[in-house]
Image (cartoon, helix red, strand yellow):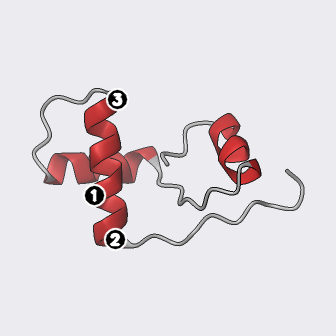
Amino acid sequence: MEATGRYGERLAYEMGIFFSLISPSKSRAFNQSENASTINDKECAKLLRKYGIQKQPDVYQMPDAF
């Protein structure tokens, strides 16, 4: 999941979905490395999935004060 806001993080966490947070700058750099010219929601989701498979980022841990 791209770290662009708190709503999605909290919702996924409350639903018991395991996920990783990726900064928008890392996402953008990965998209450029994949020569992604057109980015819409569907393509972005595919690229984030590919990033997760290749990079294996850590699973997000919700902070206690959330």
Of residues 14 and 33, the one nearer the viewer is 14
Local crowd size for mark 3, using a 10 Å CA cut-off: few (<14), some (14–19), many (≥20): few
Local crowd size for mark 1, using a 10 Å CA cut-off: few (<14), some (14–19), many (≥20): some
Query: Mark 3 — residue?
Result: 41
Give the residue at x 30% y 32%: 42
Residue 41 lies in quadrant: top left
* Relative side of 63 to 20, left or right: right
Residue type indicated by callout 1: Lys
Residue 19 lies in quadrant: bottom right
Give the residue at x 62% y 36%: 5
Query: Mark 2 — residue?
Result: 55
User: Which element type, helix, strand or loop, lies under badge 1?
Assistant: helix
In the displayed structure, 41 sits above or below 48; it is above
Residue type indicated by callout 2: Lys
Report, in whole angstroms, how far the alpha carbon at label 1 lies from the one at label 3.
Answer: 14 Å
* Relative side of 22 to 15, left or right: left
Mark closest to the chain's N terminus, 1 or 3 = 3
* Relative side of 59 to 15, left or right: left
Query: Mark 1 — residue?
Result: 50
Q: Are marks 3 and 2 in contact (CB under 8 Å)?
A: no
Report, in whole angstroms, how far the alpha carbon at label 3 lies from the one at label 2.
Answer: 21 Å
Give the residue at x 25% y 53%: 30
The disc placed on residue 15 is: none
